[in-house]
Image (cartoon, grey):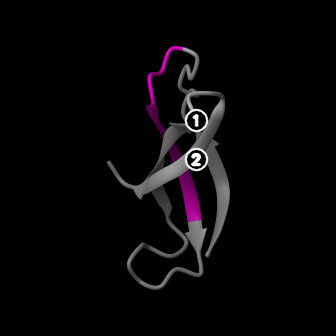
Amino acid sequence: MTFEDVSIDAPPDVAEADTEVYVHIDAVLHGTDGSLPNGELVGWGYGLTRQDGGSRWLVSNQGVG
């Protein structure tokens, strides 16, 4: 699957975040498996979790919501 025309909402203030943040994006998706609309603008997001009590952030989940 590919993403085009990606726009990212204002980034979260990770300096103020405890251990988790959510980042919302809008994108046009291509090559989907049918579970998401192909060639249409879709809202999507990624949950990021702080690792090792420091500045390393990993994607912990994804989806709408």
Q: Amino acid at mark 1?
A: Asp
Task: From the image, give the main secondary structure of the stretch colored magenta.
Answer: strand
**Who's the residue at 54% across and 50% down the image?**
59
In the rendered image, which residue does mark 1 sit on? 52
Q: Secondary structure at mark 2?
A: strand
Task: Return the mark for residue 17.
Answer: none
**Residue 17 lies within the magenta run:** yes
Using a 10 Å C-alpha cutoff, classify the residue at mark 1 as few (fewer than 14 neighbours), some (14 to 19) or many (20 or more). Answer: few
Task: Return the mark for residue 58.
Answer: 2
**Whole-percent x and y of residue 33?**
47, 85
Q: Is residue 7 above or below residue 33?
A: above
Query: In the figure, is residue 7 to the left or right of 18?
Result: right
Q: Is residue 44 above or below residue 8?
A: below
Whether tag 1 and tag 2 are in contact, CB under 8 A, the answer is no
**Residue 50 lies within the magenta run:** no
Q: Amino acid at mark 2?
A: Leu
Query: In the figure, is residue 1 to the left or right of 44?
Result: right
Task: Tell which residue pokes out farthest to the bottom in this image.
Answer: 33
Sequence-wise, which precedes: disc 1 or disc 2?
1
Query: In the figure, is residue 9 to the left or right of 5?
Result: left
What segment is highlighted magenta in the picture?
A: 16-28
**Whole-percent x and y of residue 10?**
56, 27
Between 20 and 28, the residue placed more toward the observer is: 20
Between 36 and 11, the residue placed more toward the observer is: 11
**Whole-percent x and y of residue 14?**
56, 23
* Residue 55, quarter of picture: top right
Using a 10 Å C-alpha cutoff, classify the residue at mark 2 as few (fewer than 14 neighbours), some (14 to 19) or many (20 or more). Answer: few
Q: How much space separates mark 1 and mark 2, taking CA atoms?
A: 11 Å
Query: In the figure, is residue 65 to the left or right of 14?
Result: left
